[in-house]
Image (spheres, rainbow, N blue to C red):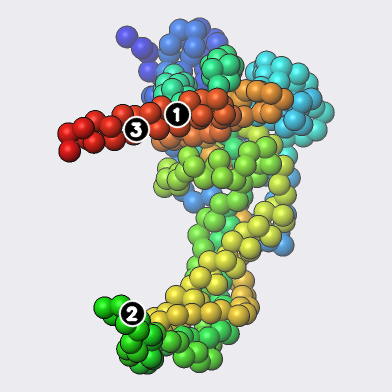
Amino acid sequence: MTDVQQQATETFSCKGCGGRPVWDPESGNMKCPFCGSVTQVEKDHTPPTEYALGDAPTAAARDWGDKKRVIRCEGCGAQTVLGANESATFCPFCGSPHVLEDQSEAGICPESVLPFAVAQKTAVTSFRSWLKHKLFAPSKAKKMAQLGQIAGVYLPHWAYDDQADSTYVGEAGYHYYVEVPRTVTRDGKQVTEMQREQRTRWEPAAGRVDEFFDDLLIPGSKRLEQHLLERVQPYDLKGLCRYRAEYLSGFAAEKPAVTMEDGWQDAKNRIENQMREKARQDILSHADEARVSSIRTKHTDTKYKLTLLPMYLSSFTYKDKVYHVLVNGQTGKCSGEAPVSPARVAAAIAIGAAVCYGLYMLFSRVI
């Protein structure tokens, strides 16, 4: 029976054998990989510290609670943060084995973290199931993907709070109908009939809309395409915990490649798009069609924090292109990208055409 211990885990030392325990997603605690002893971790769900845009984190905000080191991939340039006694044999973002220790600092410590809740073996099962359904992927690419290693990595995300107040100018369209003559053919003769036709009357429109954005997430990574990240979302942020070094034991964390300032510019663009759509819906509340020609948004009470979200990554190279497969470390949802074999697509089309032709001939004989 596994021995469960209650202790402070800042030392990362197993009381059973002295080994270094790692975060165990299945139990939600620290577990020693050598003797199986479990160390309970008390999760702190109190709201993390948020900073105003003009405030830089203090020096204390760079304390990760445990010695960390940064490694850099010579292939893609990705920087990941590891524990002082942990090592990496390959880059999770491109699969390259050429990873070297970087002399740079780990940087700002995240304010919160969403701990891994899916075990690696479960992520591997999800990955294999996803790959099995890629019918048009070349066989060689599938074999290379199977050989690829899967790694658990915390991806940095900037989370922004913002009160957006927008004023807009546009047009409201109202439908009305008129009877217009149309020439049609009836019984071989051309006749003129009156038909009902919809038209739109446009009038100036202006108004104000507001919205509070809570924890608008902007990826701090440049290594993964946004559309890939969106495919395995959402995350349930109710599970966010205040950062503790224990959660990273046995896992890596990517060092943010996007600055807080650049992340805010991206966030503002997303807010602008959502406010424009809200303005359009505001016009549609009393009109049939809507146009928004201009919008001005005022941002107040804007704050930010850095959080880590769990992700399993597998990368493989096929014909000099790197393909990524992602598994959400909280839900197990899997998605990714894979090459398509033109030969397999052509074969599928040919088989489909043959089946359709066979069915046609069968029904023709019956009739």
Q: Find residue 73 and report its image quarter.
A: top right
Sequence-wise, which precedes: disc 1 or disc 3?
1
Image position of 172 with respect to 307: above or below: below
Residue 88, above or below 255: above
Residue 364 visible from this viewpoint: yes
Q: Residue at x 43, y 22 (%)?
A: 132
The three-letter amino acid code for the residue at tag 3 is: Tyr
Q: Quadrant of residue 87?
A: top right
Q: Position of residue 15 (x, y in %)?
A: 49, 13
Residue at the far left: name it: 366
Question: Viewer-proximal residue, 204 or 110?
Answer: 204
Q: Secondary structure at mark 3?
A: helix
Going 45% across and 29% down the picture, which residue do you hit?
A: 350
Disc 1 residue crowd, few under 14, some 14–19, many 20+, Cα 10 Å = few
Position in image of residue 3 (x %, y %):
37, 13
Q: In the depicted view, which residue is nearer to us: 22 or 220?
A: 220
According to the picture, the residue beneath numbered tag 3 turns out to be: 357
Q: Which residue is mark 1?
A: 350
Q: Quadrant of the C terminus?
A: top left
